[in-house]
Image: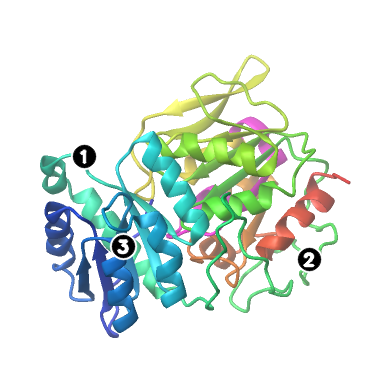
Amino acid sequence: MVIESHSPSTSAPIKVMLVDDSAVIRGFLTKILGTCDDIHVQNIATNGLEAVNMLAKQRCDIIILDVEMPVMDGLTAIPKLLQTQPDVKIFMFSTLTTQNAETTMRALALGAVECLAKPTSTQDLYAKNDFKDTLINMIREVASARKPVHSPPRDTGRLSPAPKSTAVVSEPVKSRLHPHAPKTMTLRAPHDGFSGKPDVLAIGSSTGGPNALFKLLATLRGIDVPIIITQHMPPTFTRILAEHIKMQTGLSAVEAEDGMPLVAGRVHVAPGGFHMLIERKGATPVIKIDNGPPENFCRPAVDPMLRSAVKVFGNKVMTVILTGMGSDGMLGAREVIKAGGRVISQDEATSVVWGMPGAVALDGSCSAVLPLDDIGPWLRKSSLRLP
């Protein structure tokens, strides 16, 4: 899920609160975060109520929050924590079970920004460095993002879309658009050499991605091309994500399987733990599930999905890079542009973390850099040709 190392800050240490009823987990997290000079474990709580009371007395930057706890569980605690400090960033820490995946998806809708897969045994806690690296990089990058403070979303009993954007449609000062992109960021058809409708819509996302996906996909009802999505998520969680996409957007959505044909109008979500590639079986584009090495420290990763899509569809690839950490998708976006396809990035103001979309925007691989609310209308009018 975290994709790229982030240099330690020379400013004040990042203040972290750990909330878990397991003494083993609390000790494990304290130990690995204690190796970082730029991260300080400021408070430790055993349940959600303790966490809320501690936060009321002392602000922090990041909260690592368990799902299942006595007195007050993580899901109940999120709105209270965000009410106490609206700009705090919450990571859900959950075991890979279907029940916890459902709960974590709800937690993301309530305002959590990331989910972490909890190691399943004491041996796993200390046997692997990849969890340590993922957690540390995630903390550093999320803490470094300067975001405006929003009120926590109201719990409606359903997953909520991302907050409505108030950003204007404008090119961020540091963005470098593709040379053939329009000089002003409007919703008119771009002049980047792309002709006709795309044959596939490929979307990459990570931190903050689920709510951004719900928001975007809900605007694409009636789409008549396949949608392929790589969202950085652990196994089990991606199947639940596909189910929630179907519930929230009205689009058909599935977790991808090996050999599954791409179907127009259907959303195909890369399964956690595997890359999702596209290949041809005769004349039919089908999905290949790949267990190759992680890219950008991720599996699934966006880059291999985009590379494979270009091999199958050439210049008929429409790509959207949404909020997320690191730079996954940047190299793949280059291949899309090189082949004559199109790439859109979410802007900084509406991203939870402007890592992935920012990397693509600064690389000069974008036809447009747009607020989340404007991406769907742009796609409908400029590429998908939908009414």
List the residue tagged with mark 2: 182
In front: label 3 or label 2 = 3
Q: Nearer the viewer, mark 3 or mark 1?
A: 3
Q: Mark 1 belongs to which amino acid?
A: Thr
Q: Residue furthest bottom?
A: 11
Label 3 CA crowd tier, 10 Å (few <14, some 14–19, many 20+): many
Which of the two discs, 3 and 2, labels the residue nearer the N terminus?
3
Q: CA distance from mark 3 to mark 1?
A: 22 Å
> Where does label 1 land, which residue?
120
Observer-nearest of 302 and 234:
234
Q: Nearer the viewer, mark 1 or mark 2?
A: 1
| Mark 3 touches mark 2? (CB < 8 Å) | no
Q: Position of residue 246 (x, y in %)?
A: 63, 37
Residue pushed farthest front? 71
Q: Residue 208: percent from the left, percent from the top?
A: 50, 58
Which residue carries the number 3 mark?
48
